[in-house]
Amino acid sequence: MPVFANAAQFAGSRPFEAASGAGAEIVDPHGRVIGRVSTGGVISPTRHEIRAGDILFRFGGTGVPPQKIALGAWWMEKASFEKALSFAMTHGISVGMATRVLCLVPPEWSNLGTLIRAAARRPLLAYRGLGNSVVVPKDDGFGAVRLPHQNEIAARRVHQLFIPGLGPDMIAVEQSWVMDPKAAMRGFIYL
């Protein structure tokens, strides 16, 4: 059985809650938690093992160093990234916009201006699942940004990984690309 480099950070309920998008608690008049606001994350996160050498992709903001982007928790496996790339080419949009649509990444979270390809240096634990709908409050008077998942359409199902506790010794950045953040917004309309 492999030794997972992030086993300690994977333990407990917090990583599962973060992967499932659990947010603020909803309490009854007696202070008992009766629910949580959920936005983003993945639906039904399942434990997933990443082997040393597995290729992963992640977007980050413009000007953020690739090594810093590599410390973030949200990733795509190679097959998922290839699905997003194929979706982009089929629909004539940027891979950033395809990722925004398929992985449900509102502009408030990232401009998707940098893309990295990395390899796992050591075995890692992750939660894996399909993107969940996102609701992001806005104070512009038009209400919240709502990105509903489209998992009922097989061609739009992209599994995402939530990898808690990444350190610089766990992921090796192999390549990075400067992406056009405007292209990752082209066609995105708030309704």
Image (cartoon, grey):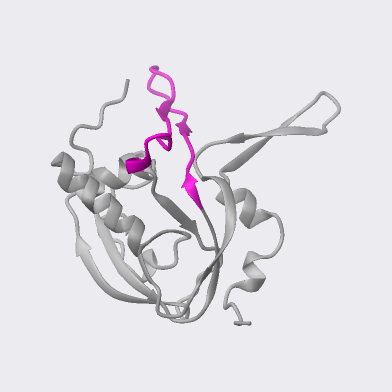
Identify the residue at the far front of this view.
Answer: 154
Relative depth, front residue between 11 and 68? 11
Based on the picture, tell me whether residue 138 belongs to the magenta stretch. yes
Point out the stretch of residues depicted in magenta.
129-156
In depth, the one of 40 and 83 nearer the eye is 83
Visible residue check, residue 58? no
Where does residue 148 sit, x and y in percent of width and height? 42, 30
In the rendered view, would you say 25 is above or below 79? above
The quarter of the displayed image where residue 8 is located: bottom right
Residue 30 image offset from top left, x and y in percent? 86, 27
Quarter of the rendering containing residue 21: top right
Q: Position of residue 94 (x, y in %)?
A: 18, 46
Q: Quadrant where the N terminus lies?
A: bottom right
Query: What residue appears at the point 42 percent right and 34 percent down from the top-left corner?
Result: 152
Seen in the picture, residue 165 relative to 93 is either above or below; the reply is below
Q: How many marks?
A: 0
Is residue 121 visible in the rendered image? The answer is: yes
Residue 149 magenta: yes
For image coordinates 44% across by 61% down, the residue present is 72
| Furthest residue in direction right, as rendered | 30
Classify the position of the C terminus by image quarter. top left
Residue at (51% x, 46% y) in the render: 42
Q: Residue at x 35, y 56 (%)?
A: 80
- Looking at the image, residue 138 sits to the left or right of residue 15; the answer is left
Residue sticking out furthest to the top? 141
Residue 160 at x, y percent in the picture: 44, 53
Q: Is residue 20 left or right of residue 113?
A: right
